[in-house]
Amino acid sequence: MFADRARIIIKSGKGGDGHVSFRREKYVPNGGPDGGDGGKGGDVIFEVDDGLNTLTDFRHKRKYAAGNGEEGKKRNCHGKNGEDLIVKVPAGTVIRDAESGKVIADMSGGSRRQIILRGGRGGNGNQHYATSTMQAPKYAQPGQPAIELEVMLELKVIADVGLVGFPNVGKSTLLSRVTNAQPKIANYHFTTLNPNLGVVDLEEGQGFVIADIPGLIEGASEGVGLGHEFLRHIERTKMMIHMVDAASTEGRDPIADIYAINKELEAYDPGLCKKPQIIAANKIDAIYGGDEDPVEKLRREFEPQGIPVYPISAVTGQGLKELLYAVWNLLQTLDDAPIVFEQEFFPETSLYADEPYTVSYDEKEQEYVIEGPRIEKMLGYTNLESEKGFLFFQRFLRDQGILKELEDLGIQEGDTVRIYGLSFDYYK
């Protein structure tokens, strides 16, 4: 079975604790503190591997953890940073928070490497806490804790065109004729259990990627059969070729089939039915004389709705060129940007949303002060020296309502904000 979903637990590295020690050298009987800082915990990084096309590997291993940072050492020696964990996934993998179902990252388009969980910051050694009144501090800061999160991985096929229709209408035969794919073909239902990808090459370097989405059935949107497993692959496509058996070789009504499939698409995601469609009326080589041409019936029903109908025979090749160029021309009118799911869940901010914090004004120092476990932990997972990290922390302050609380206290541009020893000038 095609492995396109997996549920795993990922854990970042814990920051190493700061060290407590004092200089003990000959002729220096009362040396000062020299405890080193703990190492940073390792990050959990997801990376696209073009050699992968399924999530099968994740069915054999469920837990993934980055390395912990080492404790600081004597003589101001810094503890070793924990080793990052790099998790390889196929392109098109969507990473979601398992509990809420919200998107953490979409490994598609230009997103080929993303830090999903950041390792904890290492704690400060006791050398940082020496003051004029306490010259021998016996305290060091513990490292930031690790973050553990259960995530759902979903592989959504990346293709320009989705090929949909009921089982046994000839989709695999079409794909084998017009692309380099080699799908399994036989005359029984559900031959195709895996979404097959193929590249259609037209003249002068023109072409597109087409995905044969395995046969859908009524009730697929409710998970009947393998419904959800298949429907998720249509989400990324820009348009669809809706294939029907125009000859009704199995006694099915092609018009009813199209409405039935579209009903399932709409029930799964209303946005799917808004994608452009082209109807491929297949098996015209098996149409024999009768009361009415079934292709004309399809045209009368759907072309007034803006859905063109192209008669084809996937077996003989009749009408395929016209169909493929119609698809190509339609694709040229659509947005060519890849469909990428936006991030909805931010692990660091979401996991500590319930922890307390305070916002106050220090009249003596004339500074606005932000403190609390939530703030301290966020600082531990954020690199404020980088522009991206600073913007991330600024967004965290805004999303938590902290910036609004500062404004309610009367903060003005240019005023100083202090957060655990770090001072910033406030600007909107």
Image (tube, grey):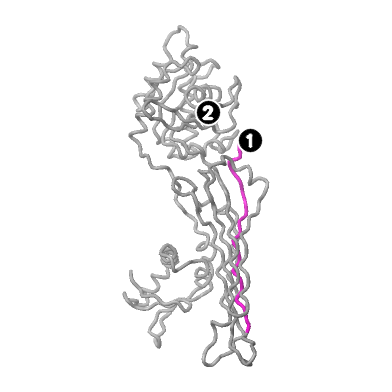
Q: Horizontal placement of 282 versus 31: left or right?
A: left
Q: Is mark 2 on a helix, strand or loop?
A: loop
Residue that badge 1 annotates? 1
User: Residue pushed farthest right?
Assistant: 60
Disc 2 marks a residue whose amino acid type is: Ala
The percent position of residue 187, horizontal first and vertical second, equals 59, 19
248 w.r.t. 95: above or below: above
Q: What range of the chain is rendered magenta?
A: 1-21
At label 2, counting other C-alpha atoms closer than 10 Å, the crowd grade (few under 14, some 14-19, many 20 or more) is: some
Image quadrant in which you'd find residue 296: top left
Q: Which of marks 2 and 1 is in front?
A: 2
The residue lying toward the viewer, choosing from 41 and 36, is 36
Residue that badge 2 annotates? 181
- Could you say which disc has been placed on residue 147 in the image? none
The percent position of residue 339, horizontal first and vertical second, equals 43, 43
The residue lying toward the viewer, choosing from 48 and 95, is 48
Q: What element carries label 1?
A: loop
Disc 1 marks a residue whose amino acid type is: Met
Image quadrant in which you'd find residue 80: bottom right
Q: Which residue is drawn at 54% across and 84% down?
A: 129
368 w.r.t. 353: above or below: below
The percent position of residue 385, horizontal first and vertical second, equals 44, 68
The residue lying toward the viewer, choosing from 406 and 330, is 330
Give the mark, 2 or 1, whose residue is nearer the N terminus: 1
The percent position of residue 182, horizontal first and vertical second, equals 55, 26
